[in-house]
Image (cartoon, rainbow, N blue to C red):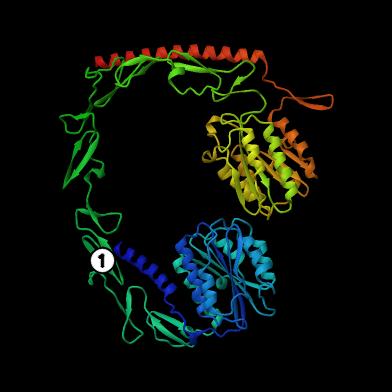
Amino acid sequence: MRQLRGLCAFALLTLAALATARPKAGPEQKCKSGPVDLVFLIDSSRSVRPHEFETMRKFMIDILDTLDIGLNATRVGVVQYSSQVRTEFSLRAHAKLDSMVKGINEIIPLAQGTMTGLAIKYVMNEAFTAEAGDRPKVPNVVVIVTDGRPQDRVTEVAAEAREKGIEIYAVGVARADMTSLRAMASPPFEDHVFLVESFDLIHQFGLQFQDKLCGMDLCLESDHGCEHICESSPGSYHCLCLPGYTLNDDGKTCAAINLCTEGKHDCEQICVSSPGSFTCDCNKGYKLNDDKKTCSMIDYCSFGNHSCNHECVSVLNGYHCTCNEGYRLLDDGKTCHAIDLCVEGKHDCEQICISGPGVFTCDCNKGFKLNKDKKTCTNMDLCNTVEHGCEHQCVSTPGSYYCICPEGQLLQEDGKSCGTCKSANIDLVLLIDGSKSVRPQNFELVKKFVNQVVDSLDVSAHGTRVGLVQYSSRVRTEFSLNMYHTADEIKAAVMKVDYMEKGTMTGLALKHMVENSFSEAEGARPASRNIPRIGLVFTDGRSQDDITEYAKKAKEAGITMYAVGVGKAVEDELREIASEPLEKHFYYTTDFTAISTIAENLKLNVCPAAEESQGEIEVKDPCACESLVEFQQATMSSLEQLTQKLSGMTARLEQLENQLLSRK
């Protein structure tokens, strides 16, 4: 086992050496290959940690050090991407290495999603253009560095880029998906696809990439005589040793480094050496801790044969039993017996004594409260002594209370608030399209449409809650479900929303809604309360990303989805978003000025008790019936009486149980 651990460490260190051994090229070692237009496309999504981004930065600089940089030689551009794409500098921006290195060091990561397909399309259409510095009849090369799975489609756009003559190298790090890398890269894959375990090993690709640009490798084409590793440089080579070895004076052979002998270890008891590495072990009677360095005495209790009722305590070469607090150890040295202070009469509770092993607490009968001394009890009126939360009126009963509402209103599901049937109690999140195709004047109509919907709702903290999300090429929560508690506050906030412009990433917006907008952190009430969750998506055009996955996930999460489309909205996409039946959840109009009619129709689905009268739509109030109010009050009274009877029976059963225990 020690030898196996040593070999594993040896292999990992070998990879590290291969990644970092190449020395920095001097001016005389510059690659003299033909001119190339080279663009680095680097992933700066949130999963790339700051120190990993620094490794990517150094990786690019190290490659540039080996290239003949110049406007008539090798031109280099850098583009970074996450959920958006940004050119850091173009192919024509820098003619000298120093200014190019400065530009790389000034890059600030975007730290968002991973839209690799969007980034490839951007490079194809923007980076390799004459305006950006691309030269005709000069090879176009893209090096994509990513650590994750793309959140959009890459296969088609990568194929289009390759058809235009762009050679693509795909470098995946750590969590990268090999299938996605192969979908992006140029053939043959063995020359263009690289997957390394960490950012620290990314230089493995750098070595091979430099060799492809710089030509002959003397390590492969000469009898170099290196015992371990031959490292090529333009027109020359030198020998290196694997990790754990040092180069001898002859410059070719290697000698193993024994860290145990040299005292370069931190093992507490035993050091086991391997070339350039070591593992720790322990003396007999001890075991190695999780830190793989220190040792602990063997726990005999862990063998499971001690028979202790509660706790087993290991000692050198044995063990003994102990009991938890409130228990005493019997004469057999293993069994524990609970100490019941209530049964033994060692308490001073006025009404109820609740026993625990070795401890007790006092409680009171139904309709009484425990005083500050935690022993005596006082009769109480809960409506006057607790924060009952009743919106209208609180009615006290012995040891309890209930809420009632004024005539013509019903008690809501929370048992405290009152409401008419103007709208149901719902958690409603509206996703509005802020893409550039909407245009500013129409965006104002969209905001008025949102406020018409809000006017049809009973907005309150305990009633209907409303959240608003705007999306274009990115997604922005304008306000969450728990930010505003009145319709006027919401309508004022809606009118202050700024128009985003840019693209139409409807799939990204649906993802944000499912994963964030309906979370309890953003004000959604717990699913256990069965408050309906409703999502309303408003759009005027085709989505630039895939909506299928998160349209399905929204419905699987119990969200009722409404889809409202205007103008160039794609009806098939709207139908895919909308819940069944489609005729109640899907709306479309060709003109922004007609969306007010959709807002009126939406009221019918939120509060469906509506009738047509003389060609006009009249929304009835099905709850404003005296019989329903009387039924509510009668039901509450019956339930309260039943609760009182059950409480009395529970108290009586507790007294009988205590008496039985005392007889034992």
At 47% from the left and 18% from the top, the residue drawn is 383
Specify whether 154 is left or right of 47. Answer: right
- Comparing 136 with 17, the one in front is 136
At 62% from the left and 53% from the top, the residue drawn is 474
Q: Quadrant of the C terminus?
A: top left
Read off the residue under disc 1: 265
Using the rendered view, name the quadrant where residue 81 is placed: bottom right
Q: Position of residue 41 (x, y in %)?
A: 58, 67
Using the rendered view, name the quadrant where residue 587 is placed: top right
Residue 580 in view, yes or no: no
- Comparing 127 with 210, the one in front is 127
Label 1 residue SS: loop
Q: Quadrant of the N terminus?
A: bottom left
Residue 114 in view, yes or no: yes
Using the rendered view, name the quadrant where residue 450 is placed: top right
Specify whether 627 is left or right of 523. Answer: right
Q: Is residue 117 above or below residue 342?
A: below
Q: Is residue 526 above or below residue 633?
A: below
Q: Position of residue 307 (x, y in %)?
A: 23, 36
- Comparing 229 with 457, the one in front is 457
Q: Position of residue 15 (x, y in %)?
A: 42, 70
Q: Amino acid at mark 1?
A: His
Q: Position of residue 228 (x, y in %)?
A: 38, 79
Specify whether 294 is left or right of 652. Answer: left
Q: Is residue 514 above or below residue 64?
A: above
Q: Is residue 611 above or below residue 657?
A: below
Crowding around mark 1 (Cα neighbors within 10 Å: few <14, some 14 to 19, many 20+) is some
